[in-house]
Image (cartoon, coloured by chain):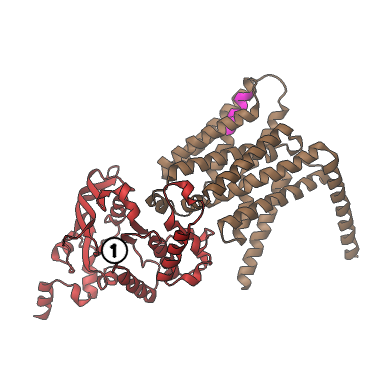
Chain colours: A brown, B red
Amino acid sequence: MGCLTESCLIITKKITMIEFFQNVFAYEFMRNALFASLLVGVACGVIGTLVVLNRIVFLGGGIAHAAYGGIGLAYYFGQDPLLGAIFFSILSSLGMGAVHLRTKARSDTLIGVMWSIGMAVGIIFVSLTPGFKADLMSYLFGSLLAVSAEDLRVMAIVALLVIVFVSLFFRSLQAISFDETFSTVRNLPVEALYLLMLLMIGLTVVVAMRVVGLILVIAMLTIPPAVANLFWKDMKGMMLLSVGLGWLFSFVGLAAAFALNLQAGPVIILVASVSYILAAAIKKLTAHAS
Amino acid sequence: MVKQTVIELEDVWAGYESDRVLESVNFKMEAGDYVGLIGPNGGGKTTLIKVILGLLKPERGTVRVMGLSAEKGRHFIGYVPQIQQDDKAFPIRVWDVVSMGRLKPNLLQNLLLSEVDKAAIERSLRQMDILDLAKRPINELSGGQRQRVTIARALASDPKILLLDEPTSSVDSRSSSQLYDLLAELNQTISILLISHDLTAISTYVKTIGCVNRRLVYSGQKEITTEMLETAYDCPIDLVAHGLPHRVLPHHYEENNHD
């Protein structure tokens, strides 16, 4: 009997998957959602690997939340919120980077302060702006199904910038992530490279925000590399695997959200989180076995 | 023939904010030297390394590396830091770690490894006898193997000076003596400055010994003087009690023992 129900389940799953793929090509918003997942998956997988290996997850969260200040300001002055977010994330990534480089030990406190200032400014200006603000919620929680052609262009530019940046400076980035002191002794421009890296994190955070919202951006940046880190032994492989995992989590999450009529962002993150827990458990079990 | 001075510190005072760690440090090292500096924990060993590498600006005094300022001259130094346990999680292979010795200040020159770079990496891997480990991730290595990787990385940069910080802290005693044999061999072409709290280990291998504990006592001798003992008494005293290798003891001390 158990067998029967199981096969039933597989059949229903197949139907929803077919439906899903039919819809992907039938509706523009589904096509956009898929393209967005692909592009953001590239940026997040590559940059997320650097975030995880440099242990600056908190800094990434700070940049994401400070960017909300830009969104609020842009709304108030009738500008494009995306531009406001980009402007503020660049500003906050450089500011937090400078603080991090100068005051190593206590930087987390100062980053926490900037994180809150950005958020507070955003909330105040949003509440000062009259009218309907449904779109603002989409920055907090993501709106993968409302991605516009304009958003896609920005995502494509950011993904391209990330690829060019990491391909050009791969060895140097690997070196400063692994051993900052040794890189300094080799007279590498460690600080400039570090700030450039944070700038890329800022841009990635802005585009990832469209997919999962700023609150869950951290998950999008850290979970795929965290899973990849369990199984891969070098940085290049970890980046590539993270991109693949990001795509997988996004597609499965998107399909599940579609089938269950739920919001895409949180479902994607749940898929990713559950995968991480499973992967860590498998890793632990196999390590014990051998 | 006048020997080239590779490292020179003149009246260096250094520390952090209100906490002064080094006072009036004078030190001169020449090409071909193999200097071991010992000192207790918190005696300023790490600060001394930072000053030599130009990572910490001294409050007073001058630092010269190969006749240049520390920032300019440090690329002649093959720095071998203490192994950190926490970078075990970093996913990287031996070859990639050693290739960091070939990094150039101009980022665009680091795009690809040149044939010269590759040859230097291979040579230093062979020198440390770890060529067969090149493809292995570092978290699969033993402490001794990882220390060899760190030294190979320093050697890949064709250094004039090797600067080692506690090289045997995470190495068992057998690999540690092998390591010192390798260093003695390298010393035929490279000057070595070795900093450690472990006198017994280094005293049999280095050519000259000094002691750092806020002040630096170094006169280019092979022996531990009473002055050193007085300056840094918390470190060597217990080592004396445990029995030092014969040749390290100052003469009058030896005579007293025989009487």
Check disc 1: other Cα within 10 Å, few if <14, some if 14-19, many if 20+: many
Magenta stretch, main secondary structure class = helix
Is A205 inside the magenta-drawn segment? no
- Residue A62: image location, x then y, percent: 55, 38
Corner quadrant of residue B156 = bottom left
**Residue matched to label 1:** B192
Residue A71 covered by magenta stretch: yes
Q: Position of residue B95 (x, y in %)?
A: 49, 63
- Residue B147, by quadrant, is bottom left
Tag 1's secondary structure? strand
Q: Is residue B222 left or right of residue A89?
A: left
Task: Say which chain tag 1 marks.
Answer: B
**Left or right placement of residue A137 versus residue B41 in this view:** right
Residue A265 appears in view:
no
Residue A139 x %, y %: 67, 33
Label 1 sits on what residue type?
Answer: Ile
* Picture coordinates of residue A238, whole percent (x, y): 60, 56
Q: Residue at x 71, y 25 (%)?
A: A133
Which of the 4 quarters of the picture holds residue A88? top right
**Residue sitting nearer the eye, A109 or A184:** A184
* Extent of the magenta region: A67-74
- The answer to whether one can see residue B109 in this image is yes
Q: Nearer the viewer, residue A174 or B231?
A: A174
The quadrant of the image that shows the N terminus of chain B is bottom left
Residue situated furthest front in the rendering: B115
In the rendered image, the quadrant that contains the C terminus of chain B is bottom left
Q: Which residue is drawn at 56% across and 41% down?
A: A200
Seen from this angle, which residue lies furthest left? B259
The tally of labels here is 1
Is A194 on the left or on the right of B5, as rendered?
right
